[in-house]
Amino acid sequence: MINVISIIFIAILIVLFIFIFKQSQKPDYDERQELIRGRGYKYGFLTIISLDTIFLILNDQINFSTLLTISIPLFAGMYTIWN
């Protein structure tokens, strides 16, 4: 019974996946919007690299949830200072 349910679930996901990608169109961005999106990707990449480095260094010393609680407002504050 579980195998039948999982096969039906996977089939529904595949149909949804195909339907979403056939219906979606790429939006047209002008040059300024592309620059802003690129800057956002850059900030996101630098944030992930910074958080991974902090997690690697402080892995045994601090709890994961505590580190996230501290780091999210810290990086949000850094973003507002840079802008």
Image: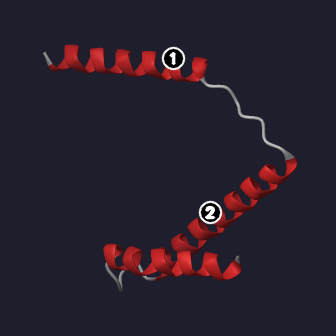
* Category of crowding for the residue at label 2, using alpha-carbon neighbours closer than 10 angstroms: few (below 14), some (14–19), many (at least 20): few
* Name of the residue lying farthest toward the bottom: 61
The mark found on residue 19 in the picture is 1
Query: In the visual, does 42 lie left or right of 69?
Result: right
- Vertical placement of residue 31 versus 80, above or below: above
Front position in the image: 65 or 72? 72
Query: In the visual, does 44 lie left or right of 51?
Result: right
The secondary structure type at the circle numbered 1 is: helix
**Residue 53 at least partly seen:** no
**Residue 78 at least partly seen:** yes
In the rendered image, residue 65, in percent from the top left (x then y), is placed at 32, 73
In the rendered image, residue 67, in percent from the top left (x then y), is placed at 39, 78
Please tell me how many numbered marks the rendered image carries: 2
Query: In the visual, does 37 lie left or right of 79?
Result: right
Name which residue lies at 81% across and 56% down.
35
- Vertical placement of residue 39 versus 1, above or below: below
Name which residue lies at 70% across and 30% down.
26
Name which residue lies at 70% across and 76% down.
83
The residue indicated by pointer 2 is: 44
- Vertical placement of residue 49 versus 33, above or below: below
In the rendered image, residue 20, in percent from the top left (x then y), is placed at 52, 23
For residue 24, what is the image quadrant?
Answer: top right
In the rendered image, residue 62, in percent from the top left (x then y), is placed at 34, 83
- Lower sequence index among marks 2 and 1: 1
The three-letter code of the residue at mark 1 reads Phe
The span from disc 2 to disc 1 (Cα, nearest Å) is 29 Å
Front position in the image: 81 or 57? 81
